[in-house]
């Protein structure tokens, strides 16, 4: 669910300087390594000296839905600024060991033009950060620039299918076209408002339940970088919104809507290719159950099969049903399946009592006195198999709270999956639900205990009456007790636990949450992980945003761990140099470079930067590796990047794509004047404003010319030499 990740030490560099020169950080765009300069790299954290960015006012239209303004909590209103950053005044004392950046995302804008969305889950994603260092706190937020958000902003209307929203067709033909786009996935949203994870290679990705809604962001500036492109051919349209991410791997589930079941897949750190571990076939119902999240143990993946199942008919409807894209099939029963991570074999599959859960908390392996595995224990935030929780999250319901207790009951549901061949598993409350007010969702644990036996969890509970979880609660699953934090009128975000470095106790650390208040204010809150007492808070200078959303997930970027910049730089240089080497065409092998042999490189004139761009081709798999290495006049590498692309047999097109890719990198690096060198005379001639036909390569040239507007002065030149088709091992398979 939540992740514990690391970043490098920040630097005292003014924001204006950061925008005018190459930033000292490692970033990623699509499946690339992006290395800048010869300094310390890694995920950087915003420096405390960074000046406040200007606030961009976004006026809100009057709400169409009728509700009392006095009762409308700020937690359910759209963000009033697209982006903001500034230092907050801290009340109390932040522990000096707490150094890093806390990130979270979730719905933050629920209107477009004069149209207001229906459901909490529909809102366009807002990314929030809290940078903590030396007892000080820098806060900021920014809208994630998904295609769905940008299209809606430009056209002043909904353009993609959200959780409960469907674009309104202009006529019957456009309706038919929209349905065709639905089946291809083109009309599904990429609004990444559900989770944020840091991959093992350092890339930070925001997620939602559609696969196309995987978006790489810059954790320092909160800029949207690009869509995360999966390089495999597994296909599908959806996946679990909350994967399991560690430093070494990314695990997720891909529901199969055609042949009901789930693919369990793994993606190694540094890769964009998912590989199948195994498959689970559904045991009941016409479609897979909704799988918003799932748990793992040290050796197993637990695959939930709820009776709340995906429904193609509801997906096609222009207006939502009370269950939206799903349908309740209690007769189909409910199941839990256990798959071995190593072999992909299903080692247990049991029927369990009906359940409804959005979020699993954790799972672990239960052993007997002799150390033999006898069961899997899996805990979740369980809503007593009550499907009405989905409709209770309509914005109109949340905004019209009148003091009545309408939040459905929930509990910590504990599943026990026996390993003795039994057909049935167990489900019971892990502790008395009254301990946490019979409200339960949005949970986290000490990440060091992921997949292991644990004692403590942190979640949002309830103090009745309420219509949404309104407390923070620390759950003691061994002592069967809970400690609760509550302030009248407050709506807290999902709590996140950060362990103290060197801690030996599971609850030794700090719990972070963002709280919105009824009066329109809000604050960042820090609680002691052990006592659950408040240790510090810092008020926001504007209406608090993104605080009580059930789908929000986040991560904490600790300082201190650095990424090696030489790896992506070497890969990028290898692509560029590959085309400059002699090789025997029959053998199709890459010639090894002579050790210590100096490379020929002509410096640019007039202190310009020079970018060498090229494409390495894998004919067998129809893929091309695009590489760019940018050096300054002294020959120092200031930026290097690689990515893979489709190859249609046209070498000139691949090389033109490499030029366009190099321009993206140069723009990101803030280089005002630059020369691009390429072997491809056709691409260079067209890029230098020569005429050309409207072929596929010319369309890429048009993109190159469009990107010229972002660079003060740009030139394109050719290199002489042999052009060779060389298979590169790291180019992704189709």
Image (tube, helix red, strand yellow):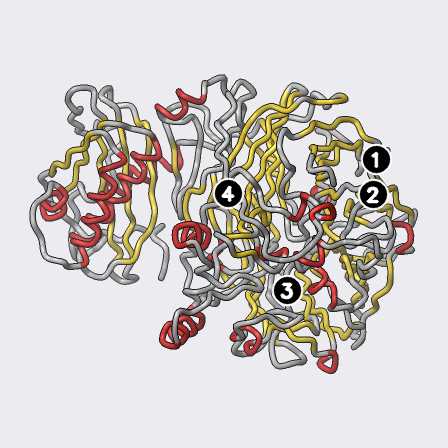
Residue 169: give x, y in percent of width and height: 42, 69
Q: Determine whether 605 is above or below 380 in the image.
A: above
Q: Earlier in the sequence, mark 4 or mark 3?
A: 4
Marks 4 and 2 sit apart, C-alpha to C-alpha, by 31 Å
Judging by the rendered image, the residue that carries numbered circle 2 is 474
- Residue at the spot 17% in from the left edge and 58% down from the top edge: 650
Label 3 environment density (alpha carbons within 10 Å; few <14, some 14–19, many ≥20): many
Marks 4 and 3 sit apart, C-alpha to C-alpha, by 26 Å
Label 1 environment density (alpha carbons within 10 Å; few <14, some 14–19, many ≥20): some
Marks 1 and 4 sit apart, C-alpha to C-alpha, by 32 Å
Q: Determine whether 402 is above or below 255 in the image.
A: above
Marks 3 and 1 sit apart, C-alpha to C-alpha, by 31 Å
Cβ atoms under marks 1 and 2 closer than 8 Å: yes
Judging by the rendered image, the residue that carries numbered circle 4 is 143
Q: Which mark is residue 532?
A: 1
Q: Earlier in the sequence, mark 4 or mark 2?
A: 4
Q: Earlier in the sequence, mark 3 or mark 2?
A: 3
Marks 3 and 2 sit apart, C-alpha to C-alpha, by 25 Å
Between residue 416 and residue 703, name the one nearer to us. 703
Cβ atoms under marks 3 and 1 closer than 8 Å: no
Between residue 66 and residue 339, name the one nearer to us. 66
Question: How many marks overall?
Answer: 4
Judging by the rendered image, the residue that carries numbered circle 3 is 291
Q: Secondary structure at mark 3?
A: loop
Between residue 592 and residue 268, name the one nearer to us. 268
Q: Secondary structure at mark 4?
A: strand
């Amino acid at each position: 669910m939540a992740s514990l990740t690391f970043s490098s030490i920040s630097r005292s560099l003014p924001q204006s300087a950061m925008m005018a020169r190459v930033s000292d950080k490692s970033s990623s765009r699509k499946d690339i390594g992006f290395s800048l300069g010869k300094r310390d790299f890694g995920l950087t954290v915003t420096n405390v000296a960074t000046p406040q960015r200007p606030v961009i006012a976004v006026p809100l239209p009057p709400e169409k839905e009728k509700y009392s303004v006095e009762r409308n909590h700020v937690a359910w209103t759209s963000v009033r600024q697209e982006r903001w950053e500034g230092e907050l005044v801290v009340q109390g004392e932040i522990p000096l060991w707490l150094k890093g950046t806390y990130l979270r995302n979730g719905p933050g804008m629920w209107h477009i033009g004069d149209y207001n969305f229906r459901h909490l889950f529909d809102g366009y994603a807002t990314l929030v950060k809290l940078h903590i260092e030396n007892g000080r706190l820098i806060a900021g937020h920014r809208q994630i620039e998904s295609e769905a958000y940008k299209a809606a902003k430009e056209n002043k209307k909904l353009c993609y299918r959200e959780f409960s929203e469907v674009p309104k067709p202009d006529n019957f033909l456009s309706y038919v076209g929209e349905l065709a786009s639905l089946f291809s996935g083109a009309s599904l949203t990429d609004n990444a408002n559900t989770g944020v994870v840091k991959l093992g290679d350092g890339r930070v990705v925001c997620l939602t339940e559609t696969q196309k809604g995987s978006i790489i962001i810059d954790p320092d500036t909160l800029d949207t970088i690009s869509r995360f492109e999966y390089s495999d051919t597994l296909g599908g349209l959806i996946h679990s919104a909350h994967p399991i991410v560690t430093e070494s791997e990314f695990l997720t589930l891909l529901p199969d809507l055609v042949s009901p079941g789930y693919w369990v897949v793994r993606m190694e750190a540094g890769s964009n290719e998912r590989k199948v571990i195994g498959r689970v076939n559904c045991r009941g119902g016409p479609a897979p159950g909704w799988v918003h999240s799932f748990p793992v143990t040290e050796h197993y993946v637990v695959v939930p099969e709820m009776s709340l199942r995906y429904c193609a008919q509801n997906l096609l409807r222009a207006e939502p049903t009370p269950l939206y894209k799903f349908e309740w099939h209690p007769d189909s029963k409910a199941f839990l399946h256990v798959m071995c991570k190593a072999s992909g074999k299903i080692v247990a599959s049991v029927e369990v009592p009906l359940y409804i859960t959005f979020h699993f908390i954790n799972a672990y392996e239960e052993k007997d006195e002799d150390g033999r595995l006898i069961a899997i224990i899996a805990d979740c935030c369980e809503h007593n198999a009550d499907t009405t929780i989905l409709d209770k999250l309509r914005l109109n319901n949340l905004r019209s709270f009148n003091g009545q207790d309408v939040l459905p009951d929930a509990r910590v549901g504990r599943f026990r999956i026996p390993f003795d061949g039994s057909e049935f598993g167990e489900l019971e409350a892990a502790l008395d639900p009254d301990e946490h007010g019979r409200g339960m969702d949005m949970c986290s644990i000490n990440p060091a205990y992921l997949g292991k036996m644990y004692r403590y969890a942190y979640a949002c509970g309830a103090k009745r009456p309420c219509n949404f979880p309104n407390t923070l609660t620390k759950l003691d699953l061994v002592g069967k007790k809970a400690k609760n934090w509550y302030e009248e009128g407050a709506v807290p975000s999902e709590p996140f636990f950060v362990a103290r470095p060197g801690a030996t106790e599971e609850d030794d650390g700090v719990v972070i949450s963002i709280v919105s208040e009824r009066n329109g204010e809000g604050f960042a809150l820090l609680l002691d992980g052990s006592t659950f007492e408040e240790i510090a808070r810092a008020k926001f200078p504007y209406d608090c945003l993104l605080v009580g959303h059930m789908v929000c997930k986040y991560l904490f970027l600790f300082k201190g761990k650095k990424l090696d910049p030489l790896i992506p730089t070497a890969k990028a240089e290898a692509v560029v140099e590959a085309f400059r080497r002699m090789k025997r065409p029959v053998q199709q092998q890459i010639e090894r470079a002579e050790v210590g042999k100096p490379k020929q490189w002509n410096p640019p004139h007039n202190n310009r930067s020079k970018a060498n761009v090229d494409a390495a081709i894998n004919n067998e798999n129809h893929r091309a590796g695009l590489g760019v290495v940018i050096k300054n006049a002294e020959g120092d590498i200031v930026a290097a990047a690689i990515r893979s692309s489709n190859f249609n047999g046209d070498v000139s097109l691949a090389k033109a794509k490499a030029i366009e890719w190099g321009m993206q990198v140069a723009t990101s690096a803030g280089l005002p004047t630059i020369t691009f060198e390429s072997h491809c005379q056709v691409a260079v001639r067209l890029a230098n404003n020569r005429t050309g036909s409207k072929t596929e390569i010319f369309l890429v040239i048009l993109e190159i010319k469009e990107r010229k507007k972002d660079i003060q002065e740009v030139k394109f030149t050719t290199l002489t030499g042999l052009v060779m088709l060389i298979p590169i091992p790291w180019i992704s398979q189709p």
